[in-house]
Every structure is written in C-alpha cells, then in structure tokens.
Image (cartoon, grey):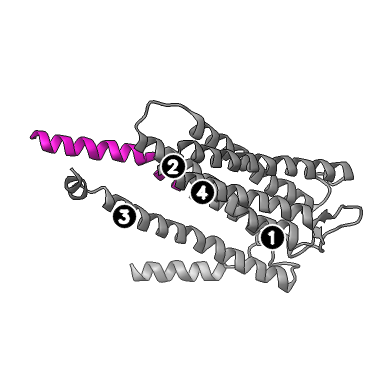
Amino acid sequence: MNTATQVITQKIISKRRSEAPVVGMVLFIIVEAMFFAAFISAYIVTSSQLDPWPPIGMPVLSFGTSSFNTIILLGSGIFVAMGYLQQNGTKKSSNKDLMLIGLLLGLSFLVFQGQEWAGMIEYGATFNSNTHSSFFYLVIGSHGLHVLGSLTWLAVVVYKRDAQNSYSRKQKLLSACLLWYFVVLVWPVLYYLIYIYPGMVVL
Amino acid sequence: MNKLFTFVSIIILTFANSANACPVCFDANEKSRIADYLTTAFLSLFPLLMIGCLVYWLKKYSGETEPHSIKSNL
C-alpha cells in the first residue's frame, strides 16, 4: 500500500468515526419516534371510548398558559437552530449565546410544566384519577424526561471543552441538536392530542 | 409445496375466530373501531416509512464520503 492510499484510508476512517454520533442519533430518534407513536396510538384508541375532558371534579387548564409554554419550547428550538447555523461564523461567542438562550427557554418550559403538574395534583388529578389523567402524566411525563435528557446532553456538548478536532465536535453538536429538534417537534403533536383534542384546555 | 400451503390455509380458515385480545371487536362504538383501523395502519406504515428514509439517507450520506470524493478533496 503506498503512502497516498494510506492517507486516504486514514482520512475515510477518521471521517466515518467522527460521523458515528450523527448516525447513532438518527437511529435513536427513529426508536424514540416509535415510542411516542405507540403512546399516541394507544391514547387515540382509548380516548375514542371516553367522554371529553373534564370528568367530574377534574380541573381545566388555561389555553393561554399552555400555548405560551408551547411557544417557549418552539422558540427554544429556533434559537438552538440559529446557534448551530452560526457556529461557522466569526463570532464564536454569539453562537454560544444563542445556544444559551435556547437552553434557558427549554429549561423554562420544564419549570412551567412542573408548575402545571403541581397545580393539577393539588386539584386532585393524579395518575390514578381517570384514564385521561393517566395518559396525561404518562405521555407528558415521558416527553418531559426527554426534554430534561436532551437539554442536559446539549448543554454538555456545547460547554464541554475537549481536545477533539472541530469536525468531530461539530458532528457531536449536530447529533445533540437533532435530538433537541425531535423533542421540540413532537411537542405540538402531543399538545394537540392531549391538551386541545379532549378539551383539557379552555380559552 | 402447494398442497401443503393449501392444507395449512384450510386448517387456519377452519379454526379462525374473533380474537379476544382485540380492543374494539366487542362492545365498541364506530368511533373506536375507526380509531383502531387508523392506528393499526399508522403503526404498520410509520416504521416502514422511517426505515425507507433511513436507508435513503444512509445511501446519500455514505456517497458523500466515498473514496473518490475524498481523493478529489486531497
């Protein structure tokens, strides 16, 4: 094997190795999509046999507050996307600032969710109250855990100082951003099905 | 082989019955029956769609890192 071929082979191996996080994340997102698809399907079949929300003694959530929360999460996705796109720019700090805004918005979403849950539990709507509330806590709770996990992963990738080459780092950042986009984009579907469709929120 | 296939098919059709595991086969309204059909179709086609997209993406992605494209970049 001559030197040129060895260099090419090494370059291919190095590039493929750097791209592994992205390929792995795409596979993981496919698994996650099926996870939520299964929940959604089970919920659609079950809710078709149920009366609309609210059952007797159950609370109704505010449309304004929950929509605002949705906008916060979508805004977070936009800021993270902008931060990712700006990483090739001259101002590295602006890239990190945008990412930080995105991360903080994501965190705000979780805090609002926590407040909503606390209010519902205080009102007496627990996991065992009825089928609607069981699905609410199961599906929204699963999404909340995904938000927490992907926010943590994104923060680690953005702020970790490593000695890896920039291409490898970009691929890791892309993989973390892909997970975040998935978590953000699945939310409007869940929001419509769990909050709006059964009438859990009112204007 | 065809005889075996015919025999097995007849046996299956003879003993075929409604599945008790079906969530909407018994005591279900029209709405839940439609919901069941739709979600069955969704859960059958959605993975196939994603696998198709993945294969297409991997093919396209690996094409960008083929030796000739890297050679030309050297």
Q: Nearer the viewer, mark 4 or mark 3?
A: 4
Q: A31 or A182: nearer the eye?
A: A182
Residue A119, how many percent across, how many down? 84, 43
Q: Provide the major secondary structure of the magenta segment.
A: helix
Q: Residue at x 73, y 55 (%)?
A: A67
Location of mark 4 (residue): A81
Chain label for disc 4:
A
Alpha carbons under labels 2 and 1: distance apart? 34 Å
Instruction: Tell me the element at label 1.
Output: helix
Horizontal relation, residue B31 to residue A19: left or right: right
Given contact means CB atoms under 8 Å apart, are the residues at marks 3 and 2 in contact?
A: no
Provide the residue span drawn in magenta: A1-27
Chain label for disc 2:
A
Sooner in the amino-acid sequence: mark 1 or mark 4: 4
Q: A121 or A56: nearer the eye?
A: A121
Q: Is residue A7 magenta?
A: yes
Up-down relation of residue A90 to residue B42 (above or below): above
Can you tell which mark lies on residue A87?
2
Q: Outermost residue toward the right?
A: A57
Horizontal relation, residue A83 to residue A128: left or right: left
Location of mark 3 (residue): B59
Instruction: Give the amino acid at mark 1.
Output: Tyr
Q: Outermost residue toward the bottom?
A: B30
Q: Residue at x 62, y 52 (%)?
A: A74
Q: Residue at x 41, y 58 (%)?
A: B53
Location of mark 1 (residue): A192
Residue A189, how many percent across, how many down? 64, 58
Given contact means CB atoms under 8 Å apart, are the residues at marks 2 and 4 in contact?
A: no
Residue A99, how many percent across, how many down? 54, 40
Alpha carbons under labels 3 and 2: distance apart? 27 Å
Q: Are marks 4 and 3 on the same chain?
A: no
